[in-house]
Image (tube, helix red, strand yellow):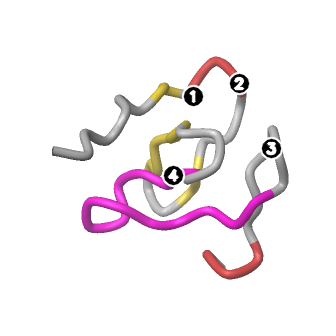
């Protein structure tokens, strides 16, 4: 299922994270929860991921 999911914002592929409890979009730096195996991709469930430090 994860291979066919796309970011609701930019349509980029989503990556499963943290034992499949979250899905993330690398280009948008957003993530959504996965509850009972179902990704909650509604805008109100989106969480901005912190920037990755290059040091």
Q: Earlier in the sequence, mark 3 or mark 2?
A: 3
Q: Residues within 10 Å of mark 4 (few under 14, many from 20)?
A: many
Quadrant into which the N terminus falls? bottom right
- The residue under the point 67% across, 41% down is 41
> Magenta segment, which residues?
12-25
Specify the quadrant of the image occupied by residue 2: bottom right
Relative image position of residue 31 (x, y in whole percent): 50, 41
Provide the residue designation for mark 1. 46
Q: What is the number of the mark on residue 24?
A: 4
Relative image position of residue 50 (x, y in whole percent): 35, 29
| Count of residue discs | 4
- Mark 1 and mark 3: span between their CA atoms? 10 Å
Query: Mark 4 and mark 2 in contact (Cβ < 8 Å)?
Result: no
- The residue under the point 67% across, 81% down is 3
Q: Secondary structure at mark 2?
A: helix
- The residue under the point 64% across, 18% down is 44
Q: Nearer the viewer, residue 12 or 34?
A: 12
Specify the quadrant of the image occupied by residue 43: top right
Query: Mark 3 and mark 1 in contact (Cβ < 8 Å)?
Result: no
Q: Earlier in the sequence, mark 4 or mark 3?
A: 3
Provide the residue designation for mark 3. 8
Q: Earlier in the sequence, mark 1 or mark 4?
A: 4
Q: Nearer the viewer, residue 22 or 28?
A: 28
Q: Residues within 10 Å of mark 2 (few under 14, many from 20)?
A: few
Query: Mark 2 and mark 3 in contact (Cβ < 8 Å)?
Result: yes
């Amino acid at each position: 299922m994860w291979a066919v999911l796309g970011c609701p914002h930019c349509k980029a592929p989503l990556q499963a994270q943290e034992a499949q409890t979250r899905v993330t979009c690398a280009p948008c730096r957003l993530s959504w929860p996965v509850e009972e195996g179902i990704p909650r991709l509604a805008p109100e469930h989106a969480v901005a991921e912190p920037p990755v430090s290059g040091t």
